[in-house]
């Protein structure tokens, strides 16, 4: 609803960040809330959502769903080829895609997170092919939620500087600027309108919401007013990623390092939803490939057992608990399980 209404306003000369204009579109489309659903993503996000606003809500919603199902299925299949070093398709990644509970809810809620997954997949694909400009362009896709994978941006810039990969940064900058400038062709004031949205006092902003993050858990269980403690996970994560880069920079392999960077980034992010955890697919596919190539049955690995338990627990709890806040434990649980997987890799040998 939020992406469709904002895109439709932009396409037909309106202000995509006007609460009143959004509400006037969303109510006839079936929104029964007391306030509009606002797209808080930066204006360049509209480059990816604009085509869906050209249709009426029902058609746009169907096309959005179809596009996101396609992005998830294509991404997991491509990740399977990347981590398996094979061109042979498999049904297993699709099974993993369709049974992963955050992916189910990202499709139900219509969040834009599958675009992030597609960006990560394209990034790894073009890095493997050494198509540096396209690799940099793929990183631009991740900027639709710049806060989510903030650790990636730190390492990405350090990697470019160390390796002098100026073609990569040229792809990021050129495509990024294009994405940022195209909305201006429809609405020259769009950036002023976006920042003005944050000045409206009676509209709760993203930092006011209780999302399933460690930051929100601090606010609920310890109380408001502890800003330093709320952002402590992010501060610790930044310190960790700088240390991690120093340890592995000379033999850095994006295919090997990206899953952990993504997991730590989402776990420590000050703002994230459970649907954003579709970004964990590189870690899931990496683990599935490794287990499949071992002579030991997959169910003999603790990482596989715990993954199934976490996923099942999430699915069952959704029957009774709808509030996203109470899933603040989910991303840390997947992160801890990934560490168990890495321990099992050291114990049983790499791919």
Image (tube, rainbow, N blue to C red):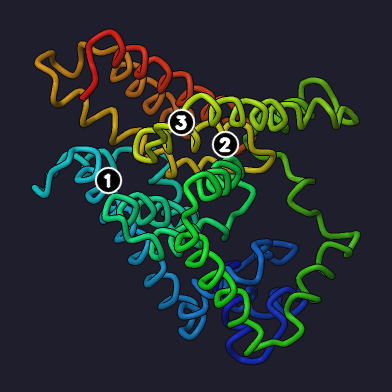
Residue lying at 36% horizontally and 12% vertically, measured from the top left: 343
Q: Pointer 3: what residue?
A: 260
> Helix or strand or loop: what does disc 2 sit on?
helix
Q: Earlier in the sequence, mark 2 or mark 3?
A: 3
Query: In terms of depth relative to the viewer, which is nearer, 165 or 48?
Result: 165
Q: Pointer 1: what residue?
A: 79
- Label 1, label 2: how far apart the Cα atoms are: 20 Å
Q: Is residue 62 left or right of residue 10?
A: left
Residue 300 lies, with reference to residue 254, above or below; the image says above
Q: Can the viewer see residue 108?
A: no
Residue 5 lies, with reference to residue 145, above or below; the image says below
Q: Earlier in the sequence, mark 1 or mark 2?
A: 1
Residue lying at 71% horizontally and 67% vertically, measured from the top left: 36
Residue lying at 48% horizontally and 28% vertically, measured from the top left: 317
Q: Is residue 167 left or right of residue 125?
A: right
Query: In terms of depth relative to the viewer, which is nearer, 163 or 153?
Result: 163
How packed mark 1 is, by other alpha carbons closer than 10 Å (few <14, some 14-19, many 20 or more), is many
């Amino acid at each position: 609803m939020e992406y469709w209404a904002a895109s439709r306003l932009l396409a037909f000369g309106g202000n995509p960040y006007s609460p009143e204009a959004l509400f006037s579109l969303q109510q006839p489309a079936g929104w029964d809330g007391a306030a509009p659903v606002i797209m808080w993503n930066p204006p360049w996000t509209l480059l990816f959502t604009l085509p869906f606003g050209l249709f009426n809500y029902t058609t746009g919603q169907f096309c959005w769903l179809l596009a996101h199902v396609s992005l998830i299925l294509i991404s997991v299949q491509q990740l399977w080829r990347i981590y398996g070093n094979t061109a042979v398709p498999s049904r297993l990644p699709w099974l993993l895609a369709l049974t992963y509970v955050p992916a189910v809810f990202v499709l139900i809620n219509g969040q834009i997170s599958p675009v992030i997954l597609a960006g990560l997949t394209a990034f790894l694909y073009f890095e493997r092919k050494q198509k540096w400009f396209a690799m940099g362009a793929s990183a631009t896709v991740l900027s639709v939620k710049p806060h989510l994978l903030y650790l990636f941006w730190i390492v990405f810039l350090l990697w470019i500087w160390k390796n002098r990969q100026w073609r990569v940064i040229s792809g990021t900058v050129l495509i990024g600027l294009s994405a940022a400038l195209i909305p201006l062709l429809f609405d020259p004031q769009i950036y002023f309108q976006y920042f003005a949205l944050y000045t409206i006092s009676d509209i709760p902003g993203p930092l006011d919401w209780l999302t399933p993050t460690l930051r929100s858990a601090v606010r609920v269980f310890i109380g408001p007013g502890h800003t330093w403690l709320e952002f402590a996970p992010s501060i610790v994560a930044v310190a960790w990623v700088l240390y991690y880069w120093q340890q592995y920079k000379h033999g850095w392999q994006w295919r090997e390092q990206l899953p952990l960077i993504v997991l730590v980034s989402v776990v420590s992010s000050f703002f994230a939803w459970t649907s954003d955890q579709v970004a964990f697919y590189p870690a899931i596919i990496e683990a599935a490939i490794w287990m499949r190539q071992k002579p030991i049955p997959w169910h003999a690995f603790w990482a596989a057992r715990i993954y199934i338990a976490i996923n099942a627990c999430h699915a069952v709890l959704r029957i009774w608990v709808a509030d996203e806040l109470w899933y603040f434990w989910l991303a840390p649980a997947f992160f801890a399980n990934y560490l168990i997987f890495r321990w099992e890799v050291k114990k049983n040998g790499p791919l």
